[in-house]
Amino acid sequence: MPFRVKACTMFSAAHRIEGHPRCGRIHGHNYRVCIVLREDKPMGIDLDELEEWLQEHVFKRFDHQYLNKLLAEDGELPTVTSEDLAQMIASWLEKSYPGMVELVEVCETPQLCVEYIP
C-alpha cells in the first residue's frame, strides 16, 4: 500500500491582484504551503531532505518578499495568486521528486486554501 508524505512551511509575503476590488491594493498574508508526495515503501522519502527542500525552494525564496516583483518577467508585474504559487511549487517539486507529487496546498489564511493536483 502506498504512503502519502506531507510537509509544510509558512512564510509572510505581500502581493496584489490587478483589477480586484479588494486585493488590487498591496497586502500581505502569512502563507502556509503543504506538499504531499507518494511513496511506495516506508521511509522511501527522507523527511529531513523534504524539509530542507521546502526551506530552500519556498521559505527562503518567498519569505518577506513582494511576490509580484519577485516573480516579474520582462519588467512586467504579474498577477500572483495562490493558484499560481501552488502550480509553480508543484513544477519545482516534480523536478526533485519526479512522479511522486500528489498535491500542493497554498493557504492565504487558515480558512482560505487552494490545492493543485498535477
Image (cartoon, grey):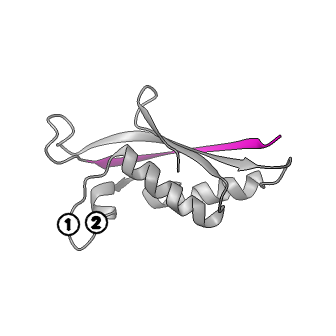
Residue indicated by mark 2: 72
Side of 81 where 8 appears, left or right: right
Q: Could you tell me what secondary structure mostly forms the magenta stretch?
A: strand
Residue shown at 28% from the left, 57% from the top: 68
Q: Is residue 111 above or below residue 35?
A: above
Q: Amino acid at mark 2?
A: Ala
Residue shown at 63% from the left, 65% from the top: 96
Check residue 17 in the rendering and tell me which mark sits there, or answer none.
none
Residue 7, position as x, y percentages in the image? 65, 44
Side of 18 where 70 appears, left or right: right
Badge 1 marks a residue whose secondary structure is loop
Relative depth, front residue between 24 and 84: 84
Q: Amino acid at mark 1?
A: Glu
In magenta stretch: residue 10? yes
Badge 2 marks a residue whose secondary structure is loop
In magenta stretch: residue 46? no
Residue shown at 51% from the left, 60% from the top: 91
Q: Residues within 10 Å of mark 2 (few under 14, many from 20)?
A: few
State the extent of the magenta-drawn residues as a range: 1-15
Q: CA gap, disc 1 to disc 2?
A: 6 Å
Residue 74, position as x, y percentages in the image? 23, 74
Residue indicated by mark 1: 76
